[in-house]
């Protein structure tokens, strides 16, 4: 298994050179094969051409580093409308948006919460569920994602 922190650091550095940000990096096994999935974003959004370009750049960099010793598939994608929120700057940037937060451990018997993100206060993620306001330590979050408002 590759050193995920080292991969994140290397990929983040390369994306920063390209004027982009690393939203998420996942190393997982799907259908018996290893996949390195990278989600990248930039101001104005990530295009298919950006993903193709980054795939070539990241792949060449990882090969040169000999960072992954086994066979794997590299996927580079935009984060999508339901993008994951991981860093404090994400929770600040998307304050006012609808979110879905899944906790590692239940809070009052519940792990999943939906509500309006209020930002970060005193190091805690603030979510207004309508019924109550939650102050969640980032270390308690298993996953947080935007919940896009889509009118059909």
Image (cartoon, helix red, strand yellow):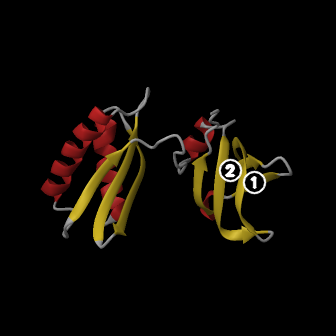
**Residue 121 quadrant:** top right
Question: On the rendered structure, is 21 left or right of 121?
Answer: left
Q: Position of residue 10 (x, y in %)?
A: 29, 51
Q: Nearer the viewer, residue 94 or 139?
A: 94
Could you give the CA–CA distance between mark 1 and mark 2, rounded to whole angstroms?
A: 6 Å
Q: Is residue 122 visible to us here? A: no
Q: Look at the numbered discs 1 and 2 and tell me whether their residues touch, using CB distance below 8 Å.
A: yes
Relative height, residue 52 to residue 64 (above, below): above
**Residue 15 quadrant:** top left
According to the picture, the residue beneath numbered tag 1 turns out to be: 135
Q: Nearer the viewer, residue 48 or 12?
A: 48
Q: How many marks?
A: 2
Among numbered discs 1 and 2, the one appearing first in the sequence:
2
Q: Secondary structure at mark 1?
A: strand
According to the picture, the residue beneath numbered tag 2 turns out to be: 125
Q: Quadrant of the C terminus?
A: top right
Relative height, residue 13 to residue 134 (above, below): above
Residue beneath the point at 65% across and 52% down: 100
Residue beneath the point at 51% across and 45% down: 83
Q: Position of residue 89 (x, y in %)?
A: 55, 41
Question: On the rendered structure, is 28 left or right of 151?
Answer: left
Q: Position of residue 109 (x, y in %)?
A: 78, 71
Q: Residues within 10 Å of mark 2 (few under 14, many from 20)?
A: many
Q: Secondary structure at mark 2?
A: strand
**Residue 20 quadrant:** top left
Toward the top, the furthest residue is 44
Residue beneath the point at 30% across and 73% down: 32
Q: Position of residue 14 (x, y in %)?
A: 28, 42
């Amino acid at each position: 298994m590759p050193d995920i922190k080292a991969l994140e650091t290397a990929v983040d550095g390369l994306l920063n050179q390209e004027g982009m940000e690393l939203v998420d990096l996942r190393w997982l096994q799907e259908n018996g094969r290893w996949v390195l999935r990278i989600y990248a974003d930039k101001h104005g959004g990530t295009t298919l051409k950006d993903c193709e370009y980054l795939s070539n750049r990241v792949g060449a960099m990882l090969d040169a580093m000999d960072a992954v010793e086994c066979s794997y598939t590299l996927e580079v994608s935009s984060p999508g409308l339901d993008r994951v929120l991981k860093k404090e700057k994400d929770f600040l940037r998307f304050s006012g948006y609808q979110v879905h937060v899944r906790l590692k451990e239940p809070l009052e018997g519940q792990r999943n919460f939906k509500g309006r993100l209020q930002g970060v206060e005193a190091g805690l993620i603030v979510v207004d569920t309508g019924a109550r306001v939650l102050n969640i330590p980032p270390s308690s979050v298993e996953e947080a994602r935007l919940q896009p408002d889509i009118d059909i």
